Amino acid sequence: NDDIAVGLTGAFLCAKYYGYQIAKNPNGGSIVNISSDLGLIAPDQRLYAKDGIDNDKQNVKPITYSVVKTGLIGLTRYIATYWAEKNVRCNAVCPGGVESGQPDDFLREVSKRIPMGRMANSDEYQGVLLWMLSDASSYLNGSIIPVDGGRVAW
């Protein structure tokens, strides 16, 4: 499947080749995988169902999305232990959904499932990503960090 080839195999190959390069550096470095809150929780399929849609088409969040995002979490933990002795750290961020012009009814329903009551703005992930890539997080390894307004806390 293309989704798995790009989302999981692609991430593995990028981490593999980048990891080999930074493992040569005595200071090591950091790899950050981008997973999803839906790598930690199952999607609520009711959010994706639409009234009046052709019955031959099923409107759901595809299974490959959850498989890829959950797989990235496992890959992160594997890489974190594989290269730890070379000072190569690997962590994952699990962002929640970003508001980007979705229909109002979808935004309203998703927001009900988030303790902060809203989806993220596109610029709200920069800080955690910069921190995870910097030396300020030099002891962070194998961590999975949700940044989702508290969604996975419910």
Image (spheres, rainbow, N blue to C red):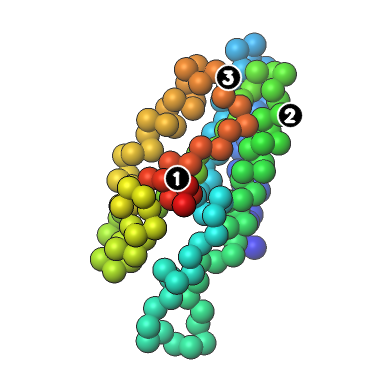
Between the residue at mark 3 and the residue at mark 1, the CA separation in whole angstroms equals: 21 Å
Query: Where does the image place residue 122, in percent across and percent down from the top left?
Result: 32, 44
Query: Where does the image place residue 60, in percent across and percent down from the top left?
Result: 50, 71
Residue 102, by quadrant, is bottom left
Q: Residue at x 54, y 55 (%)?
A: 41
Is 85 on the left-hand or right-hand side of 6?
A: right
As helix, strand or loop, the secondary structure at mark 2 comes to helix
In the image, is residue 147 above or below residue 85?
below
As helix, strand or loop, the secondary structure at mark 3 comes to loop
Nearer the camera: disc 2 or disc 3: 3
Q: Which residue is mark 1?
A: 95
Q: What number is the disc on residue 82?
A: 2
Pick whichever of labels 2 and 3 is earlier in the sequence. Answer: 2
Q: Amino acid at mark 3?
A: Tyr
Q: Residue at x 56, y 51 (%)?
A: 39
Of residues 39 and 65, the one nearer the viewer is 39
Q: Amino acid at mark 1?
A: Pro
Nearer the camera: disc 2 or disc 1: 1
Q: Specify few, some or many for label 3: CA neighbours under 10 Å numbering under 14, 14-19, or 20 or more.
A: few
Q: What number is the disc on residue 139?
A: 3
Pick whichever of labels 2 and 1 is earlier in the sequence. Answer: 2
Q: Amino acid at mark 2?
A: Tyr
Query: Where does the image place residue 109, in percent across and percent down from the top left?
Result: 34, 65
As helix, strand or loop, the secondary structure at mark 1 comes to strand
